[in-house]
Amino acid sequence: MPLANNAAFTIDFTRFLDAKGRLQRALPDWARDPKQLIGLYRGMMRLRLFDAKAVALQRTGRLGTYAQALGEEAVGIGIGAAMAADDVLLPAFRHQGAQLWRGMPMAELLAYWGGDERGSATNHNQDWPVCITVGSQAAHAAGVALAIRLKGEKRAVVCTMGDGATSKGDVYEAMNMAGLWQLPLVFVVVNNQWAISMPRQQQTACASLAQKAFAAGFGGEQVDGNDVIAVSHAVSMAVAGARSGHGPRLIEALTYRLADHTTSDDASRYRDDEAVSQHWQEEPLLRLRLYLTAANQWTKDDEEASQIELGGLVERAAETYLARAPDIPEAMFDHLYSRLPVDLAAQRAALSNGGARD
């Protein structure tokens, strides 16, 4: 049997706005509506305010370890805006922007990070809770996508992950199954250049993370992850293709993590502050604000009014979270099985009765 010809591929890159907010190519039709872009900008602003409040709560002992999306707001908001209501989102930690856009109440998201089982069990708009482990959500996403395909539903699954997760075996397995079975699944790899303290160039020899999709039998592309228009456009095209039976796709969103990995990390131990400062000039809110301001679609008064309005929403959400009664210890057994196994049910009952089992 003769050998097949060597495969060839190209990696497309999409950007609409550069770091100065200057238009680089014609906008997609939906992005020509100022209301759409202002909505995306306000979504990123709310996420940044939410992040700041969550960090403040953690620093004062009222929230668990938290992962900020600082500098990556365009990814979460762009993904959320591109999805249909009945699509399914399986996010990694730090991509809470997509969950907030899709309707998860801020108070319940805080409850999740606060360790409240009721918060982690929230299933708004059929989204799964944030995945704290690295890469396992990809296997879950493949299972959800297979179920959708077997049911003949016109829905798509979006699975987000960081650059470090692409070095995990379960991600490769999920991508292989997605390509083999042509699942309606879109992988969004948020390449923020750091897998905790490991720089991207030390975890893989690939020239891009997008090219890993070709080994699994489907296409990959790159987008400017600091350009919310580019992210939303690429994801909307990919999920539309997935719903139409065109199979999976991988989108590598190139961005930068401006914050520590989590509130338990000190990134100054392994990266240079000067390099981080340079990336502040490329951050997504500044970029879109410059564009909107130059187009006379956003003013200083708009900025101040939105800061006050959205900041108030965040504060009220935090008050709601803080007013919640503490979760009961038995909740650790909930939301694990549709029917709790006998041995675990007995342990739960013993805990409820104030006892303990060996």
Image: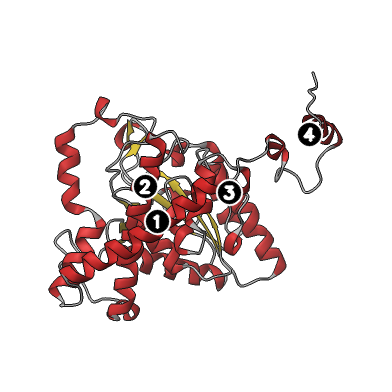
Front residue of this view, candidates 234 and 308: 308
Q: Is residue 14 visible?
A: no
Numbered disc 4: secondary structure? helix
Which residue is identified by label 3?
119
Mark 4: amino acid: Ser
Q: In this figure, what is the number of numbered marks?
A: 4
Residue drawn at (43%, 56%) of the image: 316
Which residue is identified by label 2?
53
What whole-number distance in Å separates the C-alpha atoms at marks 2 and 3?
Answer: 17 Å
Mark 1: amino acid: Val
Q: Are marks 4 and 3 in contact (CB under 8 Å)?
A: no
Which residue is identified by label 4?
352
Residue drawn at (13%, 73%) of the image: 294
Picture disc at residue 314: 1
Q: Are marks 1 and 4 in contact (CB under 8 Å)?
A: no
Mark 3: amino acid: Gly
